[in-house]
Image (cartoon, grey):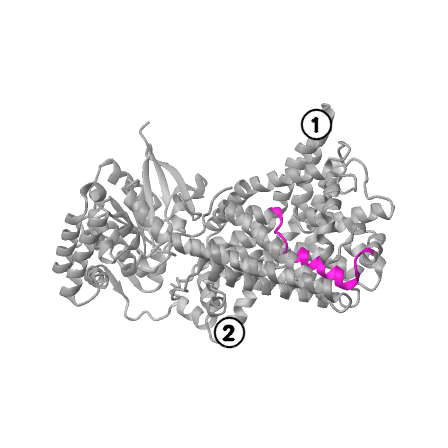
Amino acid sequence: MNRPYTIALVGNPNCGKTTLFNRLTGTHQAVGNWPGVTVERKTGRFVHAGAHYDVVDLPGTFSLHVSPGEDSLDQQIAQGYVLSREADLIINIIDASSVERGLYLSSQIFDASIPVVVALNMMDVAHGQGIHVDPYRLAEGLGCPVVPLVASRGDGIGALMDVVGSQLLGRQPAPARQPLDAPIESALLRVQAALDTSNAGPNGRLLAAALLERDAAVLARLGESERAAALTIVGELETQLGASAGDALIAARYRAIGDLTAQAVHRDPGHRFNLTDWLDRVLLDRWLAFPLFLGVMYLMFMLTINVGGAFTDFFNITAGALFVEVPRRLLEAVGLPAWLVTAIADGVGGGVQLVCSFIPVIATLFLFQSFLEDSGYMARAAFILDRLMRAVGLPGKSFVPLIVGFGCNVPAVMATRSLDTHQDRLLTSMMAPFMSCGARLTVYALFAAAIFPRNGQNVVFALYLIGIALAIITGLLIRRGLLNRDLSPFLLELPAYHVPTLRSLMLHTWHRLKGFVMRAGKAIVLVVLVLNFVNSIGTDGSYGNQNTERSMLSAVGKAITPLFAPIGITEENWPATVGIFSGVFAKEVVVGTLDALYTNMAREPGSSTGAANIGAMLSEAIDSVGTNLGELGERLADPLGLSLGNLDDRDIAAADQQVHVGTLGLMAQLFDGPLGAFSYILFVLLYMPCVATLGAIYKELGGFWAFFSATWNTVIAYTLAVACYQGGRIASDPLAAGLWLVFCALLLSGCYLWLMHLGRRRAASGTLIPVVNL
């Protein structure tokens, strides 16, 4: 079989490019990263009329040229791929309701001298707006095939495949370029002549046009003599025209486009009603926009956390039965040693169980996010919130992942995929772990029941505010220290509203979910394997010591408890340290760990029920769906889950938190009053993200930033927890408390100077701090 043909999909954002990609490739897709960056690279394949085709979905862009001062990875990737000439043919997708804008990118693509087929998409939207495009006249003017499509319905896909096949099998030439103004054409030819033929080759005109716009990426490709010669020609053209060469080139392109669309595009003079304009008058109203946005976010948050969360127990319990208990039984039945059973069942199986427990929440988030993006509302949300978010150096679209972080930090990090630039994704991902997730709330509720029975709501509210404040401070420090960049003007296209198809939503959700499970899941399983093994192995070499003082993890906890003395943790309260370690699995594990260890200290009957009944577990998993959905009505009024229940009655509070009554008593006894307890939960709020969140950060940004997040959050958590506890003791022990406060100030100053140092290194090298897989 001959090698498959390679097709690149190129188009503006919101032109239906991804919908076309899904129609062409279906489920035959792979997701990776473009070399050197963490922008998603989507590839797929299809077979038509016996020929095999590989499809590359390039990031949406308005231009192949990167203007000076711009920092758009999407444009750089699209430009680099076209220049690489890996594609045998380019399908240029154009929104039929915005032909002029789409043709600007087309005019640049034609400069690359690669065969092109124009896919005129969203013809239904254009007709609804009274816009009629004549594909035959357009094809005649462009010199390449033009295929009308409605990709969302699948209309025209077969015809497009036929045309692509005929172009490639018939080896049709690249489309003819539209001639521009004489001075510009002359300058382009002179710049092409000045370029080294071996360096430019068939890309000569595309490179020359980019140099007229002083494209920094293209300038960097040239040798010193070529660069000097090209810039000299550009300067002479600017002197001749009395204007910027780039501006003159853009204007010339649009004049040629205007002449073409005057013949091929016609608008009904009597057509006035436009659904998009009518909806925008409501959704972007000065007074209604923000309340309506909050309503949409409330709905998304409620569906993600509550409806998706209603299936979490099902996935968690079922995965526990199938991937933990079943392998344990089988491995024990064949007589494998206990350590191997622990490693496979509790380690690998437990890691898979943890990954599965996040599937319903993440899938629901991705489904709702895909709907907002495909419908066109996500761009409006970014516009509404841009002014507020820019105070922190972020675009308005960052608000959505941060809001989701109140439910779970994992989907919050995954939701950063909707952001346009790598810097925005990075900054938002570093801020998201400070959002107090629902898992941390279980810890707050336990301490509220044990130590803050009268003012637990106030304590929880204060912790939420502290998390938000630290997220903002972190964002400001990273932007000014590491990134050190000024905000670019906010330019945003507001696409027409669409009703997404179920097929498109399901495909988008499936591919995003698959990416999380297959990539982030690997890191999660590895870390859970190590932690479970250390938690199970005893100091005497025995196994099965989870959450007991005999485990190696407990021994390590006891050994390092003195490190937490400055936040009020005494050596007798070593279970609190173990709880911090176990919280690396997932923050809600802190509650189970504390309950198991305190119960053992109090010599109450343990909670073990012997070997698990797999049938009962599966039955419980099924029952949990109905139970959780039945409680959905109560959750509508409390989407953040801030209700802590009855805290006055310790028996009821213990039952609500699913812990023993003795646990609450020992906590009140071992923690140094409200001050010590608050310092501890402040640390739990801020310290390193859980394994699942770190796995998501690793997937999105690489090992360096996962390490940075874990280190930065833990240092901030320790410093502020120490400052909180010692600040409360300054009246009773001013000397020691004062010294600790000085230590905290020096540590925070050191962190700030470290960030500045990294920022200076970045500025000196001209690159972002490396994103590498450690």
**Left or right: 294, with 609 as reference point:** left
Residue 224 spot, x, y in % from top left: 23, 49
Q: In the rendered image, which quarter is residue 540 located in?
A: top right
Res 166 quadrant in image = top left
User: Tag 1: Cα neighbours inside 10 Å, few (<14), some, or many (≥20)?
Assistant: some
Numbered disc in front, either 2 or 1? 1
Query: Does the magenta stretch mainly form a helix, a strand or a loop?
Result: helix
Amino acid type shown at disc 1: Leu
- Of the numbered discs in the image, which one, if any, rests on residue 697? none
Q: Is residue 70 visible?
A: yes
Q: Can residue 111 be spotted in the picture?
A: no
Report if residue 548 lies within the magenta region. no
Image spot of residue 332 (x, y percent)? 73, 27
Tell how many labels: 2
Which residue occupies the foreground of this view, 725 or 622?
725
Q: CA distance from mark 2 to mark 1?
A: 61 Å
User: Magenta stretch: residue 678 in it?
Assistant: yes
Look at 83% across and 45% down and name the residue there.
600
**Residue corresponding to mark 1:** 331
Label number found at residue 288: 2
Residue 441 vertical position relative to residue 9 in the rendered view, above or below: below
Judged from this view, the residue extending furthest toward the front is: 735
Identify the secondary structure beneath mark 1.
Answer: helix
The magenta span reads 670-691
Task: Tell me which residue sits at (20%, 47%) in the image.
Answer: 204
